[in-house]
Amino acid sequence: MSIDAVKRAKALAGFDLMRLGEIDANGIPNIQRLAVDVVTVCDVAFAILKPQADKLGVSDEQFAEGLGGDGMRLLQEAVLAEVRDFFLKLGRTEVVAMIDQMVKFVAATIKASEARVEAIDPEALATRGESSGNSPASVEFRQTG
């Protein structure tokens, strides 16, 4: 990644890679958006890769269309790795540490969410819904604890 790629990400995707530690207008840290917001990741990645995409005649829409779940996951990992490497080479170790912590946070959040979903007892939910007169389809999943 280069400074030119950083400039393209800002101009084309509206995402300033040099401000990962800042919080956006919605109260979300930019680093979190880059780690979990698939639209942001896709837009930033396309901006970074735009010179290559132009040579191949690939539009941003075509780029996004070509990304399924596996491709998007790999793209997220690649973008974070490229951005991390860029800041490491720039000597911005605090940004590298922030990226590393965000990657750990996302992994821990996914693991915790999976555990909560696995703890749901569908039979108990269905029975509770029937006993209260509600159809099982109207039962809401609620996080407890």
Image (cartoon, rainbow, N blue to C red):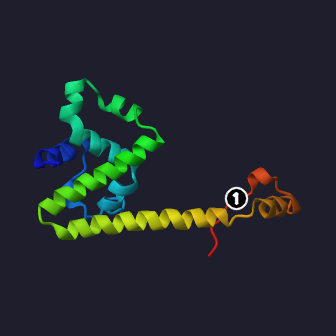
Q: Amino acid at mark 1?
A: Glu
Q: Local crowd at mark 1 within 10 Å, few (<14), some, or many (≥20)? A: few
Quadrant of residue 112 within the rendered picture: bottom right
Could you say where residue 36 lies in the image, as x and y percent from the top left? 40, 55
Can residue 24 be spotted in the picture? no
Q: Which residue is mark 1?
A: 140
Q: Is residue 68 above or below residue 124?
A: above
Can residue 53 be spotted in the picture? yes
125, 79: nearer the viewer: 79
Direction top: furthest residue:
57
User: Which quarter of the image is occupied by the C terminus?
Assistant: bottom right
Q: Secondary structure at mark 1?
A: loop
Direction bottom: furthest residue:
145
In the image, taking residue 48 as reference, residue 29 lies left or right, namely: right
Could you say where residue 82 lies in the image, as x and y percent from the top left? 24, 52
Q: Image point 27% across, 45% down: which residue?
A: 44
111, 65: nearer the viewer: 111
Q: Image point 21% across, 54% down: which residue?
A: 17
44, 110: nearer the viewer: 110
Total labels drawn: 1
Q: Image point 35% across, 60% down: which residue?
A: 32
Q: Is residue 42 above or below residue 24?
A: above
Q: Image point 28% across, 68% down: which residue?
A: 98
Could you say where residue 113 lies in the image, as x and y percent from the top left? 55, 64
Quadrant of residue 70 within the rendered picture: top left
